[in-house]
Image (spheres, rainbow, N blue to C red):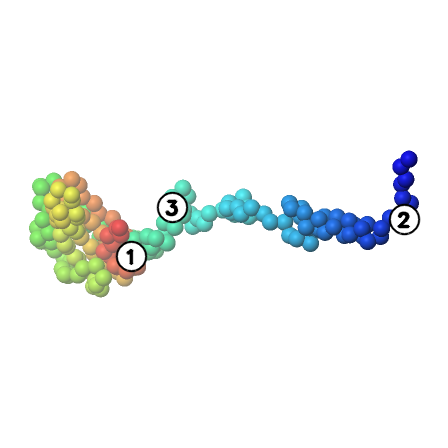
Amino acid sequence: MIVIPSPVQRRPGRLTAVALLAAALALTACGTQRATQPTAAAPTTPTSTDVPNATPYAEPGAGDGAPHHRENNGSRIARDLSPAAEQEARREANRIEPVLKGLWESGTWDPASVRTALLRLGYPSEDARPNTTQTVGALTVWPGEPRFTSERGYVTPEGASISLRVRPDACVIGFVQPTNYQVRTSGPYPETGCFEPPFAH
């Protein structure tokens, strides 16, 4: 016959030890998260969808172009011409254009010949360069800017560039070279006045 001890007959010390061991295992079980521990999340790379309405920066009016075009090319953007400045500059451009056209058609585009032909229009000549102050009413003629070529190194292209400071806020800019010629009106550039700045690299 098997005798099952009654609850009173069980050893209280052994029962207490088993209960404490079970409780300790429950509290320290591997892989079990405690309610007081924060849940760790896997690191993520933020994307534009993580922030509501997040869009890349684009300057007003940039269209499909580079978003920082105006900022990066600020020195190459001429000031706007007022209607009065445009009218005065256009009048002088209309005087200069036939002279450059005639030089181009005759195959004459060296700076000395271009200067001589334009001085006949009555402009005073000035030997100014970019980053210098050009006198109002003065004409400047200079050779093309040297350009680097992989075959011959730096080469000064044939032709001449011109600049006429019509008034403090208006310029006439042009050139004549073997392939073509051009005359246009422009406001001054922030750093170089009536001289169109070269492209930065």
Quadrant of the rendered image containing residue 80: bottom left
**On the rendered structure, is 1 left or right of 67?**
right
Q: Nearer the viewer, mark 2 or mark 3?
A: 2
Residue with the most extreme top position: 1
Residue 141 place in picture, x, y as percent = 15, 55
Mark 3, secondary structure of its residue? loop
Compare marks 2 and 1 and give the one earlier in the sequence. 2
Q: Are marks 2 and 1 in contact (CB under 8 Å)?
A: no
Q: Which mark is residue 175?
A: none
Q: Nearer the viewer, mark 1 or mark 3?
A: 3
Q: Residue at x 13, y 47 (%)?
A: 153
Q: Are marks 2 and 3 in contact (CB under 8 Å)?
A: no
**Spatial distance from mark 2 to mark 3, Cα to Cα?**
89 Å
Which amino acid does the dot numbered 1 rest on? Tyr
Q: Is residue 159 visible?
A: no
Which amino acid does the dot numbered 2 rest on? Gln
Q: Residue at x 20, y 49 (%)?
A: 174
Q: Is residue 174 visible?
A: yes
**Spatial distance from mark 2 to mark 1, Cα to Cα?**
105 Å
Which amino acid does the dot numbered 3 rest on? Ala
Residue corresponding to mark 2: 9
Residue 111 place in picture, x, y as percent = 10, 51
Q: Quadrant of the N terminus?
A: top right
Residue corresponding to mark 3: 66
- Pointer 1: residues within 10 angstroms few (<14), some, or many (20+)? many
Residue corresponding to mark 1: 189
Compare marks 2 and 3 and give the one earlier in the sequence. 2
| Front residue (pair 102, 15) | 15
